[in-house]
């Protein structure tokens, strides 16, 4: 950021670069500049056989296609080159509302984002903290432009139920990357979700109802797919969620190992309940495990067959297998 330039990162300040890029990369710049992997212009890969291979649009194009969405299946990436974009002062921060207002707030957010310009990025989440006595619904706001115009663009979020906390202010991109804080070290968590074709009222209500039992902790995060991320053809990269309109994820979190089973079950059951509106599987970077059949549901048959063929070429013995694994056979 020293030169006022950025490439899309995750929304959390402590998300890494390697896994984020190879699996997707959903962040505040999604509308303006797409996913992190849409901004990858080249990578250097050390293959299972010890070869050093450059992958780019005009060099080992098949490998470059596969790297952008299928994780670390093809080798160790030792160098990433990204396209950078100017990012100046913006309006950013979090709005927090009461849990009782969650359905109305998420519905308003959905309508706002359905017509949002590329330079407005808002994510929504229904949450109850595993660590503090805190619950509600949050909307993250990032308006890349004059902050005064930003307030106008999100006015609808102020017209309904009043936020109980309003953290919006003019800020720079590096500050925006800190608005979600950090995932506390050691917090137990399990992520499960689906790419969605649509986000009907019924699913919003279902998401809010997940928090009826007091013991449920964590958040259900809704991320819209729009703008630059949607203008890339689904065939251009191995990323599987391009045709989705939203990504919905239950991030279950808890502290007591005795709650493992119950806390994992709530995340899985939300994911299963979202199936009628889902496209394919879920976002692999958020998936604590795949939907169930060796990633074919996640990628779709055609994309999966192509990935397998590339895997056979670069890692026939499946050395790189401690990941969401594309098995060569
Ligand atoms: C708190 C938190 C917040 C998150 N927020 C976001 C978000 O806002 N947006 C989003 O899109 N995702 C987010 N994620 C998910 C994130 O994209 C994945 O966890 C991703 O794997 C993180 O990248 P990493 O480099 O830190 O991964 P690591 O944990 O280091 O690696 C994960 C896997 O990626 C592969 N990998 C990583 N680096 C390389 C490499 N150099 N070469 C080959 N393979 C490699 C390997 O298979 C490795 O096992 C979040 C995750 C967490 C825990």
Image (cartoon, rainbow, N blue to C red):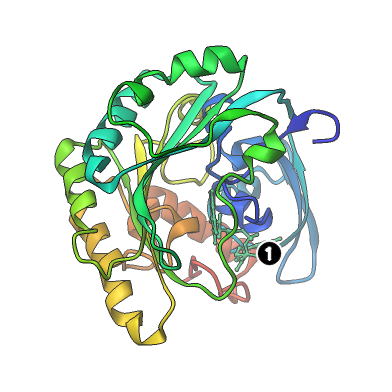
State how many labels appear.
1
Is 280 drawn above or below residue 170 in the view shown? below
Q: In this view, does 1 lie to the left or right of 276?
A: right
State ligand 1's quadrant: bottom right
Q: Where is residue 256 in the image (x, y as percent from the top left)?
A: 41, 82
Q: Which of 312 and 160 lies nearest the eye of the viewer?
A: 160
Q: Is residue 227 above or below residue 274?
A: above
| Rendered view: 73 above or below 224 | below
Answer yes or no: is residue 249 visible: no
Name the residue at the right extreme: 2
Instruction: Using residue 26 as the reference point, say whether residue 313 is left or right of it.
Output: right
Quarter-of-image position of residue 145:
top right
Query: Disc 1 on helix, strand or loop?
Result: loop
Residue 219, quarter of picture: bottom left
Q: Give me the residue at 38% from left, 35% from top.
A: 163
**Which residue is nearer to you in this view: 86 or 138?**
138
Task: Please state which of residues 190 and 245 is positioned toward the viewer in this rendering.
Answer: 190
Position in image of residue 27 (x %, y %): 55, 40
Q: Quadrant of the N terminus?
A: top right
Confirm if mark 1 falls within 8 A of ligand 1.
yes
Q: Position of residue 205 (x, y in %)?
A: 17, 45
Identity of the residue drawn at 60% across and 22% down: 144
State the residue at coordinates (25%, 32%): 107
User: x, y percentage for residue 141?
Assistant: 50, 32
Q: Which residue lies furthest to the bottom in this view?
A: 258
| Residue that carries the numbered disc 1 in the rendered image | 75
Crowd rating for badge 1 (residues with CA inside 10 Å; few <14, some 14–19, many 20+):
many
- Foreground residue among 246 and 157: 157
Residue 266 visible in the current orientation:
yes
For residue 104, side relative to residue 43 (left or right): left
Query: Which residue is at the far left?
Result: 202
């Amino acid at each position: 950021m020293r030169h006022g330039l950025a490439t899309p990162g995750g929304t959390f300040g402590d998300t890494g670069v390697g896994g984020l890029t190879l699996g997707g990369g959903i962040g505040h710049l999604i509308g303006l500049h797409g996913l992190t992997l849409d901004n990858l212009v080249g990578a250097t890969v050390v293959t299972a056989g010890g070869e050093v291979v450059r992958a780019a649009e005009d060099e080992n194009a098949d490998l470059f296609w596969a790297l952008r969405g299928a994780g670390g299946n093809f080798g160790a990436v030792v160098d990433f080159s990204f396209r950078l974009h100017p990012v100046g002062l913006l309006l950013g921060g979090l709005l927090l509302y009461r849990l009782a207002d969650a359905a109305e707030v998420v519905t308003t957010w959905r309508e706002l984002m359905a017509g949002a310009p590329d330079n407005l990025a808002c994510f929504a989440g229904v949450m109850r903290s595993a660590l503090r006595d805190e619950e509600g619904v949050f909307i993250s706001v990032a308006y890349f432009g004059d902050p005064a115009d930003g307030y106008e663009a999100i006015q609808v979020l102020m017209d309904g139920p009043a936020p109980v906390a309003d953290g919006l202010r003019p800020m720079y991109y590096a500050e925006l990357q800190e608005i979600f804080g950090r995932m506390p070290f050691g917090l137990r968590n399990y992520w499960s979700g689906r790419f969605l074709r649509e986000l009907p009222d019924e699913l919003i209500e279902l998401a809010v109802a997940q928090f009826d039992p007091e013991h449920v902790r964590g958040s259900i995060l809704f991320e819209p797919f729009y703008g630059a991320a949607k203008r890339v053809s689904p065939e251009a990269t191995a990323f599987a969620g391009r045709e989705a309109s939203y990504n919905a994820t239950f991030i279950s979190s808890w502290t007591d190992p005795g709650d493992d089973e119950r806390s994992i079950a709530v995340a899985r059951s939300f994911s299963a309940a979202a199936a009628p509106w889902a496209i394919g599987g879920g976002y692999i970077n958020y998936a604590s495990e795949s939907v169930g059949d060796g990633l074919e549901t996640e990628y779709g048959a055609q994309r999966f067959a192509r990935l397998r063929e590339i895997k056979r070429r670069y890692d026939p013995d499946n050395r790189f297998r401690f990941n969401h694994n594309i098995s060569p056979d």
